[in-house]
Image (cartoon, rainbow, N blue to C red):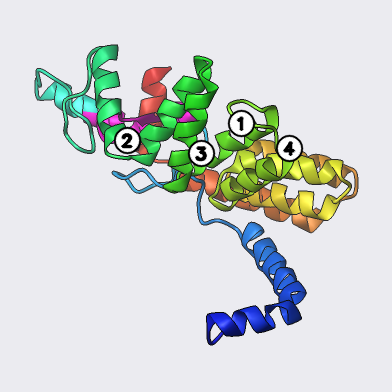
Amino acid sequence: VKYCSIKCQKDHRRQHKRACKKRAAELRVQQLFKQPESTHLGDCPICCLPLMFNMKDAMLQTCCSKVICKGCSHADMIREIQENRKQLTCPFCRHPKPTTVDEMKLYEMKRVAANDPVALRELGKESFQSGDYDKAFKYCTKAAELGDVDAHYHLSFMYRNGQGVEKNLKKELYYFEEAAIGGHPRARCNLAFYEWKNNRFDRAVKHWIIAANLGYDEALHEIKNCYLMGKVSKDEFASALRANQAAINESKSPQREAAANFIV
């Protein structure tokens, strides 16, 4: 509803407050169950191919906070070795790669000072692992405010467990939803389990299908179980299988395969 003035809003809002809340809830559901174009990781900024959820196949560069797929990192490393470079550089920003833990920390703190959401989130995760939950909550909250999807995901667990903040189920679900909307498949699966636990099977299946379409195999496994229980049709299961495989195929490249073989 649009009001012509503040006075108009005060005078007439009560008349349709309930309808406004209902419509806002409908729009939220539409937003929540819209299929994201990619996972929260997006694409590798060099080869522009999708980054998969498994971070073993990608590397976070502390100098620029970019996530580079291992195919591009490996190809760049081979090129620099062949050119007899004395020091390896970042494949993206060409800054010399850190050679010590202290250098990595220095790069990270420079990005934190620049309000880089990725660096803020990583600092929050490090603080969480060290047991400093207040500091972790502070930095993850700031990163989430700047749009970092993974920070939303970590905040949901802090609200669930009361770490650095009081337990709050509504906030926990809110941050799970924000992460899911941003393409976080694991957050999407957590919402699915919550819906399943509360006997909202249709909503749970929708969440799993969306996550499977992003190439997340754990969600596909749950869809298979739903199919065996009769909660998912044969066509829905087949469609999810095709979409899951298509997402995985889109992330493949000769460079990534070469990197995987090299690591093995």
Which amino acid type corresponds to the residue marked 4 in the rendered image? Answer: His
* Viewer-side label of 1, 2: 1
Nearer the N terminus, badge 1 or badge 2?
Answer: 2
- Quadrant for the C terminus in the image: top left
Q: Is residue 220 visible?
A: no
Span highlighted in magenta in the image: 55-76
Which amino acid type corresponds to the residue marked 2 in the rendered image? Answer: Ser
Q: Which residue is mark 2?
A: 65
* Viewer-side label of 3, 1: 1
Q: Would you place residue 19 above or below residue 211 in this image?
A: below
Spatial distance from mark 4 to mark 2, Cα to Cα?
A: 32 Å
Spatial distance from mark 4 to mark 3, Cα to Cα?
A: 23 Å
The residue at the point 47 percent across, 21 percent down is: 127
Q: Secondary structure at mark 3?
A: helix
The numbered disc on residue 165 is: 1
**Res 101 → quadrant:** top left
Q: Would you place residue 75 above or below residue 220 in this image?
A: above
The residue at the point 65 percent across, 52 percent down is: 210
Q: Are marks 4 and 3 in contact (CB under 8 Å)?
A: no
- Quadrant for the N terminus in the image: bottom right
Spatial distance from mark 1 to mark 2, Cα to Cα?
A: 27 Å
Q: Are marks 4 and 2 in contact (CB under 8 Å)?
A: no
Q: Dot 1: within a 10 Å radius of its alpha carbon, few (fewer than 14), some, or many (20 or more) residues?
A: some
Q: Are marks 1 and 2 in contact (CB under 8 Å)?
A: no
Spatial distance from mark 3 to mark 2, Cα to Cα?
A: 14 Å
* Residue 5: in magenta span: no
Q: Which residue is mark 4?
A: 221
Nearer the N terminus, badge 3 or badge 1?
Answer: 3
The residue at the point 57 percent across, 83 percent down is: 7
Q: Which residue is mark 3?
A: 150
Q: Would you place residue 118 above or below residue 107 in this image?
A: below
